[in-house]
Amino acid sequence: MNEPSVYLIVLNWNGSKLLEETLLSLQKITYKNYKIIVVDNGSVDESVEMLKAKFPQVYLIQNDKNLGFGGGNNVGIEFCLSQKTDYVLLLNNDVEVDKDFVTEMVKVAESSGKIGLVAPKIYYFEPKNRLWFAGGKVSFATGLISHVGLRETDKGLYDKVCETDYVCGCAMLIKRKVLEKIGMFDPIFNPAYVEDADLSQRAKLASYKLFYAPKGIVWHKVSSTLGAMSSAKTKLKIRNNFIFFKRYAKPYNWLTIVPSVVFGTLLFLLKQIFTGNFRISGSVLQGFLSIFKGKGKK
């Protein structure tokens, strides 16, 4: 085949119904030279049985326990690298895809040897025209990692191929040579969050470019595992954000990061307290406490 080979890794943990819907969506893609790998992170539901019964053509890797987002994907990535695939495409188990999304992402990746990672345009699953990710921003002035276009109705403002600060792990296309050079996800971010920004930053430091491919389209059933605004998610994001900026920010960046984070956190806490969301408020404090206890080491 003339098309580069693409191995799609779908990470699953107790998401049988979601996984089935994702795989049914993938059956419709137009790209030809691909293989689907499901990495099951120690599920105790019927995920494995469903997969074997309904999708026997899908290659299954079973982990004995939940290794988290980065750890689970690393198992799949290691397998893909051993197969010498040209590209690894990470995909959440709670998405549905446009039939041409792989074709469009590979097209952008193949346009330059300097491009190492590619992100698609990601919508919320409902409503289907509301944006979740149209590129990513990393601000070393404020200490924030954010999505471009988040919660906006798509009005065509983000339809140009362009560079992005990071590629979201929900749907991330990576050239094999990049992974061979910079390695996989760092386990320090286990179980989840910010490991995608870290991998993206390491790729940039290795002189690779990150690009956004707007014609590659994915719909995301957001935070189906931990919830859109769960206590666990909030705590993990605070801890892992700190690890990221401690690792990559310059000393002078902290002159603006600290006041920005303090001010932003106070506003967020006031909003949560005002709305009676005391559990989230507590998780924010727990997140910062985990930093001071030394759990955000590097």
Image: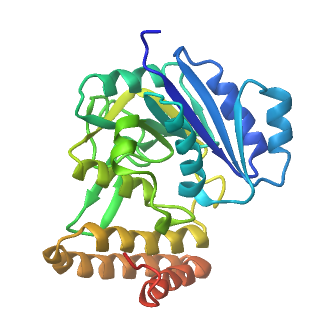
Left or right, residue 115 beside residue 68: left
- Locate residue 189, reporting x and y percent: 48, 66
Nearest the camera: 130 or 298? Answer: 298
Quadrant in the picture for residue 28: top right
Nearest the camera: 154 or 39? Answer: 39
- Residue shown at the point (70%, 26%) measured from the top left: 24
Nearest the camera: 28 or 47? Answer: 47
Quadrant in the picture for residue 208: top left
- Residue shown at the point (48%, 35%) measured from the top left: 88
- Locate residue 205, reporting x and y percent: 23, 53
In the image as oriented, which residue stretches furthest toward the left?
252
On screen, 145 above or below 32? below
In the image as oriented, which residue stretches furthest toward the front?
82
- Residue shown at the point (51%, 77%) measured from the top left: 272
Residue 127 visible in this rendered orientation of the protein: no
Residue 218 visible in this rendered orientation of the protein: yes
Left or right, residue 105 beside residue 248: right
Nearest the camera: 174 or 276? Answer: 174
Q: State which quarter of the image contains the C terminus.
A: bottom left
- Residue shown at the point (23%, 26%) measured from the top left: 112
The colour scheme used to paint the residues is rainbow
- How many numbered badges does the structure rendering display? 0
- Locate residue 264, reporting x and y percent: 34, 75
- Locate residue 193, reporting x and y percent: 49, 61
